[in-house]
Image (tube, rainbow, N blue to C red):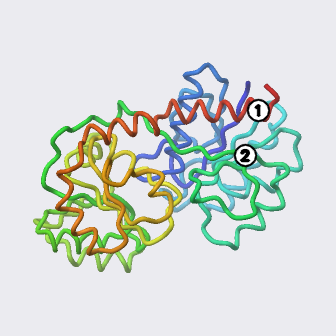
Amino acid sequence: MKIAMLAPIAWRTPPRHYGPWELVTSLLTEALVARGIDVTLFATCDSITSATLSAVVPAPYAEDPAIDAKVWEFRHLAHLFERAGAFDLIHNQADFPAHAFSHLVPTPMVTTIHGFSSDRIMPMYKPYEDRVNYVAISDADRAPGLRYAATIHHGIVLDDFPFDPVGSDDLLFFGRLHPDKGALEAIDVAAATGRRLAMAGIVQDPGYADRVLARVDGRRIVFHGPVGGETRTRMLGGAAGLLHLIGFDEPFGLSVVEAMACGTPVIAFNRGSMPELIEDGVTGFLVDTVDQAIAAVDRLGEIDRRQCRAAVAARFSVERMADAYIALYRTILGG
């Protein structure tokens, strides 16, 4: 089985700090290669992989202002589709533009839909459902009326997230500084409960970030910016709970699963995929309001941190994700 894996080009694959689509693409690629599958990764030139890297994009456009996103995205797509006949299957992780090529090559295609930015992009999905096998990353993110081949939750490498059986009294916010992620709500909860709040993430909405950073005092509310590596895992495991008070129907939540892998329970607004990720009262709490989140902080001690890790091991491992995709590939290819 020869797979062409099409990565996004906003960030390196895997990303240095932020880049959830690129991270999932990398995790799946490495897991497939470990199973002996021949994978060619189409990603930026600085990407790192054990697969065969085929790249023409000099650098990620989110990191290098000299890279024109539209120009290099078309170059990236052309680089793959001109070689489509060399592969048994194309796995697209880079949103809808690849669908425009799907009727021009005989190679079957899988698209993992990492989320819908708006209904306006649906004209690049519905007309191609007979050629492209769509995968939802949660049942909550399935668009009504669109044909899907499967729902496959993301998976992580459990060993990359050391278990912390104790944590601390501190709360954690981990995500983009954008209204969707609920940073201000997390600060409100921390202030109301008298807990220290550690925050990490990229600035995505400068105006909103200004409001957030105005409340950062460096003592009770501490902002670390984007973090990776050991700092990331230490923060994820060293908290009493992760506050994930999202302002949108999130398709998935990698930081939710990563925190639970480290033993940290999650307090999240009960919307989007959160009920698929969090077992209320077992691995965290699903709430509807800030006041309910404040009350849930006092109940974090009821959660067995070992249960959080066990749930991730059972349901959100990279092995389980890879197995599900391989089964789908075989179904599409007829065995």
Cβ atoms at labels 2 and 1 below 8 Å apart:
yes
Write the residue at 11% across / 68% down. 194
270 lies left or right of 22: left
Q: Amino acid at mark 2?
A: Ala
Write the residue at 40% across / 34% down. 313
- Give SS at disc 2: loop
Nearest to N terminus: mark 2 or mark 1:
2
Which residue is disc 2 drawn over? Answer: 149
How far across and how far down the image is residue 335, in percent? 78, 25
How far across and how far down the image is residue 119, in percent? 67, 72
- Residue 144, by quadrant, is bottom right
Would you call the spot at circle 1 few (<14 residues within 10 Å), some (14-19), or many (20 or more)?
Answer: few
Near-viewer residue (204 or 334):
334
Near-viewer residue (259 or 208):
259
- Distance of label 2 from label 1 (alpha carbons): 10 Å
Which residue is disc 1 drawn over? Answer: 331
Q: Where does the N terminus fall, quadrant-wise?
A: top right
Near-viewer residue (299 or 49):
299
Residue extending furthest top? 36
